[in-house]
Amino acid sequence: MDYREVKPITPKQAWEKLKNKGVDISLEETEEVLKFLRMLARMTVEQHLRGATAKDFGDSHTESVN
């Protein structure tokens, strides 16, 4: 599948999927969650393209324990 063929999920689609899974969330809350997830995804891709790692941000959870 070509990535250009993928359409973003709409808040209503996400809300319906969550509702079918038993998650009690409003459409407005779903919109906010999607905004946050898209922001997080964009930041992750940007960091990856720059070659940034978790160590660059002081994330101790990803460092080796020796």
Image: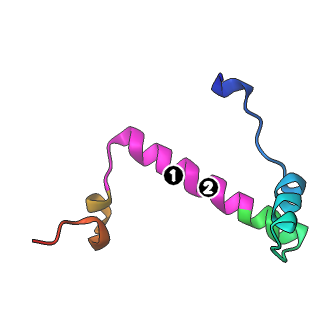
In what element is the residue under mark 2? helix
The local crowd at label 1, few if under 14, some if 14 to 19, many if 20 or more residues have their Cα within 10 Å, is: few
Tally of numbered discs: 2
Q: Main secondary structure of the magenta part?
A: helix
For the residue pair 15 and 57, the one nearer the viewer reads as 15
Residue 13: image location, x then y, percent: 87, 52
Q: How is the image coloured?
A: rainbow
Q: Magenta region: which residues?
A: 34-53
- Residue drawn at point x = 32 percent, y = 49 percent: 52
Q: Is residue 37 left or right of residue 66?
A: right
Residue 6: image location, x then y, percent: 73, 32
Per the image, the residue denoted by label 1 is 43
Per the image, the residue denoted by label 2 is 39
Q: Quadrant of residue 61?
A: bottom left
* Residue 63 colored in magenta in the image: no
Residue 17: image location, x then y, percent: 83, 58
For the residue pair 7 and 32, the one nearer the viewer reads as 7
Q: Is residue 5 above or below residue 36?
A: above
Amino acid type assigned to the residue bearing label 2 in the image: Met
* Residue 49 colored in magenta in the image: yes
